Amino acid sequence: MNTLPPKTDASAYNFGFLDEYAKKEIRRAILKAVAIPGYQVPYASREMPMGRGFGTGGLQLTLSLIGPDEVVKVIDQGSDDSVNAVNLRQFIEMTCPGVSTTTRTVEATLIQSRHRIPEHTLSAAQIIVLQVPYPDPLVVVEPSEDKRKTMHGEADYSRLLVKLYEDIVKFDEITLSHRYPTRINDHYVIDPSPIPRWDVPKINNSEALILFGAGREKKIYAVPPHTKAEPLAFTDVPFRVEHFHDATGNRRTCSRCGCDGSFLDEFTNDAGAKVYQCSDSDWCDEMLLQVKSWREVSA
């Protein structure tokens, strides 16, 4: 009986791991998603050498778009050094020979991210791919996918607004910290992935193309450049981002670089005290270099 030789290295795989037919199908889905901003386009999500829920949707989009001259950045909750980011970056390097990777946002042409949009303003030459666990914001109010499709088609989001209103009645404000429902181009409401509210305004009128890939749910959707994106809110209870103020009303700063204008993560140091640090590691490194340069000049 004939047997196939074992694949022992990256050269045994197609460039980008996926076969060309799979890439073409994903690119067609991306084109449709760009043509209809916010619409969830179904696609045949392939099996990847990792469990669903670990970024397979975003990775498939990245591998379908990647070219030989691409510069790729992979981040997980703002960090380039987390386990998920490192594993995905190594997989891209292994299956896409010749492709450059970077930890700097300004150098990247293609950014794959989990749970964050970088602090740097993205340019028209960049594409950001966001990993999405649950693409449909209506799932919290309607379990039937058929009914959700009808509601999306009719732009009927009244039940979602009622859900937000109930939050206000209970807590005097909308308490959603991530996955904040956002209306795209005055029609479709999307789940912008588990990004914090801090990142939601970055979607509006972005110069970069923003793509969302849900591998487990087999959906792709997009926010094209210069597209209107408005978070759902009420006139008397407007949308707001995290403020990071302490009990005295002062804005907390990063304990590492001193930045007071970035999204902060909370940590507990060895002494048991709470400290705050920039979530975006590249931004933090850049701010730290600026502080060091300023000190050298001042000295």
Image (cartoon, rainbow, N blue to C red):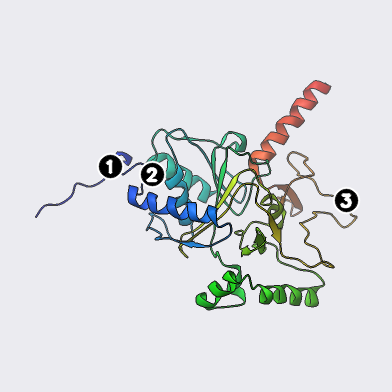
Q: What residue is shown at x 72% (from left), y 34% (from top)?
A: 288
Label 2 sits on residue: 16
The quarter of the displayed image where residue 13 is located: top left
Q: Position of residue 34 (x, y in %)?
A: 54, 52
Which sits in the foreground, 140 or 75?
Answer: 140
Placement of the N terminus among the 4 image quadrants: bottom left
Label 3 sits on residue: 250
- Say whether residue 203 is visible: yes
In whole angstroms, how far apart are the C-alphas of marks 3 and 2?
48 Å
Mark 2 element type: loop
| On screen, residue 45 above or below 171 | above
What residue type is disc 3 on? Asn
Q: Which mark is residue 221?
A: none
What residue type is disc 2 on? Gly
Q: Nearer the viewer, mark 2 or mark 1?
A: 2
Q: Position of residue 84 (x, y in %)?
A: 51, 51
Which sits in the foreground, 210 or 94?
Answer: 210
Label 1 sits on residue: 12
Residue at the left extreme, as displayed: 1
**Earlier-in-chain disc, 3 versus 2:** 2
Q: Nearer the viewer, mark 1 or mark 3?
A: 1
In whole angstroms, how far apart are the C-alphas of marks 2 and 1?
11 Å
Q: What residue is shown at x 71% (from left), y 61% (from top)?
A: 231
10 Å neighbourhood of mark 1: few (<14), some, or many (≥20)? few
In whole angstroms, how far apart are the C-alphas of marks 1 and 3?
57 Å
> Do residues under tags 1 and 3 come within 8 Å of each other at their CB atoms?
no
Which sits in the foreground, 184 or 232?
Answer: 184
Q: What residue is shown at x 80% (from left), y 44% (from top)?
A: 260
Mark 1 element type: helix
